[in-house]
Image (tube, rainbow, N blue to C red):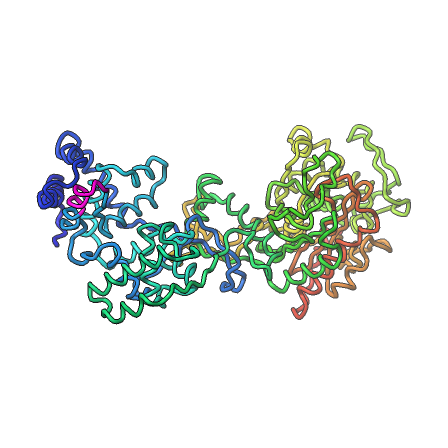
């Protein structure tokens, strides 16, 4: 056929000819035809032209796959319509022939609209009063493509409503489309768009769900069964117990295949005698469907969803982004390191039972990239809360379930939970701010057991122990976690500066109290900030400390190492300068000077029992077992809150940074107790040890003479 553009009236000629052959197309279509050739012809023709151009490039919704870090192990999928686009060359001829036999035997003879089919439908309907259709495969594809490309409910309704006007437009677009793309392209798109029931959209999904095989391997019997479903997936569902309707429909398709010469009569007869043998598969969907072997990876999957919903590259708002995830056909490779993840799971699970009200969790981040290498917590990732006990929170209602042993709550961060008070791990922020402002590691103060702060309106914090009193430097003050030294240091540098630095390192304030204290007009008076009274998540703390390990270069936390579009190209976003960057690439910026970060690391070696490059830790520390456990240079900080309601440890080497906590997420007043404060220390140190086993030992870079003082 010619590809020359035709005038609007000319394009109606095939439709009018079909009507003449049939005597009349359908009585109800008379008015739309007149309307199209009358006052509304130009507007309607323009709209049809626009939609036809859309159909040339329209792709159906496609499943997004989430892979393990090997890029091969499928962890789960996200889909609104379970579908994987498949090329015609990867489909058995059996399914192509079966769909022609079932739906459009003259597919290769007509040009988008079948006049004989229209005539046959009209005569049949006139005799029986029925509503037999005359839709060709091309017309059906047009309808499906308009539905799949619809962006508003109105467009969906217009694409599927049972009106003669819609039918006429559909015919018109089918004729135009066949001038633009080949029959093979139409067949390929049709088989990738059709719905086969059981959430199977497209032939790949149908082959997998019903027969656990690929479209390339479909037998004539299987192909006929699937082709028979398109007309009415529920009526001809082969998964029904008696299979009577499905078998009857399949046999009809096999007979038609024989009549069209695709099967010999004997082959068709033999095929009809076979029972329908199903091998049903239920494809995983969303994070709760991650295989049991990888159950703990569900928390990383959940973080992926929350991270994705915040990326402008995938849409203008959260709803658009999630819709894109479920329809965009992405290939997403998680950043988890199986070795580090296994270490995290083992060491968290060994410290606190899954059935404990206290959550012990850990997040491991990679300095210099921000990629999350492990996320583990002593919980089972599951939506089934039936056997969970009642919440430990006395203010919760009697029907409120606890978060253990099963939960999908983002206990490790990346969601909408505020987190947990992180105690003295926050002392890193005023120390780092002080070093970056020009103060030295040797900055000294005779720290009393109790200190009255005039800057903070007479607030009088005290140390946890009288042994912490006396002359302290940043090394010894940090190693012993001397409260009064750090309140004094925070006064010197300014609490607001420490708060702003924490924000630059990725911390966010999620409670009304924290947001109020962190506001520009109140941050200067937030003296207790250095004692960690604010809520934080292990994800935030691991990533903040990772920036220090990376010489002050902060990288946004990221749960992926690759995201590919459906066409195999990397997913990108536009920068303010107009450049396109891969969404999965690290996004880093220098927050403090490298020398300040190195100096902070030198002081942070003191709590772990490690030896700093330049100064003295003062004889003892709060977590002196860490260096011996990790077996390589390590820095970090302990943290406990009032009455040890929660306990933390954040530790890092040049390669990895890890943050672990223990707390009751349901009831923050349920104290874990002093005896539990070692749990995060052991979880981090043992995870770093096991995760780095067999890798070369790297050294921290010492700070300069100038910043040592």
Residue 117's spot in the image, x, y percent?
17, 50
Residue 401 is drawn in which quadrant?
A: top right
Residue 528's spot in the image, x, y percent?
76, 36
Residue 38 is drawn in which quadrant?
A: top left
Residue at 71% x, 54% y is 354
Horizontal side of 41 relative to 609 (left or right) equals left
Horizontal side of 43 relative to 610 (left or right) equals left
Q: Nearer the viewer, residue 298 or 529?
A: 298
Tell me: residue 21, above or below residue 265: above
Residue 703 is drawn in which quadrant?
A: bottom right
Tell me: residue 639, above or below residue 41: below
Horizontal side of 143 relative to 446 (left or right) equals left
Residue at 64% x, 42% y is 507
Residue 165's spot in the image, x, y percent?
22, 36
User: Which is the main secondary structure of the residues drawn in magenta?
Assistant: helix
Q: Nearer the viewer, residue 626 or 94?
A: 94
Q: Quadrant of the N terminus?
A: bottom left
For the magenta stretch, what is the residue range?
121-130
Q: Is residue 361 a member of the stretch shown in magenta?
A: no
Q: Is residue 41 visible?
A: no
Horizontal side of 401 relative to 476 (left or right) equals left
Q: Is residue 85 visible?
A: yes
- State how many labels appear: 0
Q: Is residue 124 a member of the stretch shown in magenta?
A: yes
Tell me: residue 515, above or below residue 182: above
Residue 447's spot in the image, x, y percent?
86, 42
Residue at 67% x, 62% y is 343
Tell me: residue 369, above or below residue 438: below
Residue pushed farthest right? 466
């Amino acid at each position: 056929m010619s590809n020359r553009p035709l005038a609007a009236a000319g394009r109606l000629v095939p439709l009018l000819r079909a009507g003449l052959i049939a005597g009349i197309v359908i009585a109800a279509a008379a008015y739309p035809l007149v309307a199209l050739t009358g006052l509304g012809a130009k507007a309607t023709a323009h709209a049809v032209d626009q939609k036809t151009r859309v159909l040339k490039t329209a792709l159906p919704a496609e499943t997004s796959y989430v892979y393990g870090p090997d890029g091969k192990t499928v962890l789960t999928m996200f889909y609104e319509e379970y579908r994987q686009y498949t090329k015609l060359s990867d489909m058995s001829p059996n399914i192509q022939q079966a769909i022609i036999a079932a739906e459009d035997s003259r597919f290769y003879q007509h040009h988008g609209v079948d006049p004989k089919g229209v005539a046959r439908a009209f005569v049949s309907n006139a005799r029986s009063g029925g509503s037999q259709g005359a839709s060709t495969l091309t017309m059906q594809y047009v309808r499906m493509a308009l539905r799949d490309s619809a962006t508003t409910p109105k467009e969906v309704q217009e694409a599927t409503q049972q009106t003669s006007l819609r039918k006429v437009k559909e015919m018109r677009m089918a004729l135009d489309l066949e001038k633009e793309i080949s029959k093979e392209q139409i067949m390929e798109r049709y088989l990738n768009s059709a719905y086969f029931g059981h959430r199977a959209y497209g032939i790949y999904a149908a082959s997998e769900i019903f027969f656990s095989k690929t479209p390339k391997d479909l037998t004539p019997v299987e192909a006929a069964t699937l082709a028979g479903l398109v007309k009415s997936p529920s009526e001809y569902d082969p998964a029904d117990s008696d299979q009577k309707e499905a078998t009857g429909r399949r046999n009809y398709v096999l007979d038609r295949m024989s009549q069209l010469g695709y099967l010999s009569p004997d082959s068709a007869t033999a095929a009809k005698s076979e029972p329908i043998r199903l091998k049903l598969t239920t494809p995983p969907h969303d994070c709760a469907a991650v295989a049991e072997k990888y159950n703990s990876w569900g928390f990383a999957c959940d973080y992926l969803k929350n991270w994705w919903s915040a990326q402008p590259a995938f849409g203008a708002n959260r709803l658009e982004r999630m819709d894109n995830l479920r329809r965009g056909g992405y290939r997403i490779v998680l950043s988890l390191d199986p070795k580090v993840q296994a270490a995290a799971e083992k060491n968290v699970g060994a410290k606190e039972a899954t059935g404990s009200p206290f959550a012990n969790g850990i997040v491991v981040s990679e300095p210099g990239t921000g990629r999350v290498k492990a996320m583990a917590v002593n919980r089972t990732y599951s939506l089934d809360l039936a056997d969970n006990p009642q919440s430990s929170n006395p203010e919760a209602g009697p029907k409120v379930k606890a978060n253990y042993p099963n939960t999908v709550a983002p206990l490790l961060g990346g969601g909408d939970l505020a987190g947990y008070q992180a105690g003295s791990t926050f002392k890193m922020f005023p120390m780092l701010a002080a070093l970056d402002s020009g103060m030295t590691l040797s900055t000294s103060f005779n720290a009393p057991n109790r200190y009255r702060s005039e800057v903070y309106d007479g607030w009088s914090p005290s140390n946890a122990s009288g042994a912490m009193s006396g002359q302290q430097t940043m090394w010894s003050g940090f190693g012993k976690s001397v409260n009064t030294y750090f309140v004094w240091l925070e006064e010197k540098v300014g609490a607001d500066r420490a708060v702003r630095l924490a924000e630059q390192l990725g911390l966010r304030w999620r409670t009304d109290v924290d947001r109020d204290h962190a506001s520009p007009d109140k941050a200067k008076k937030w003296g207790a900030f250095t004692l960690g009274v604010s809520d934080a998540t292990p994800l935030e703390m691991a990533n903040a400390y990772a920036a220090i390990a990376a010489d002050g270069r902060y990288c946004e936390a990221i749960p992926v190492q690759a995201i590919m579009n459906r066409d195999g190209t990397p997913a990108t976003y536009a920068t303010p300068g107009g450049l396109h960057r891969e969404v999965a690439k690290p996004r880093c910026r220098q927050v403090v000077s490298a020398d300040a970060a190195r100096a902070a690391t030198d002081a942070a070696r003191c709590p772990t029992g490690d030896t700093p490059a330049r100064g003295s830790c003062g004889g003892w520390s709060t977590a002196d077992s860490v260096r011996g456990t990790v077996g390589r240079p390590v820095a970090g900080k302990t943290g406990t809150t009032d009455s040890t309601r929660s306990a933390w440890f954040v530790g890092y080497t040049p390669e990895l940074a890890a943050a672990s906590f223990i707390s009751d997420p349901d009831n923050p007043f349920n104290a874990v107790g002093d005896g539990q404060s070692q749990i995060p220390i052991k979880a981090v140190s043992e995870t770093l040890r096991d995760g780095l086993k067999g890798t070369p030992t790297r050294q921290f870079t010492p700070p300069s003479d100038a910043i040592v003082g």
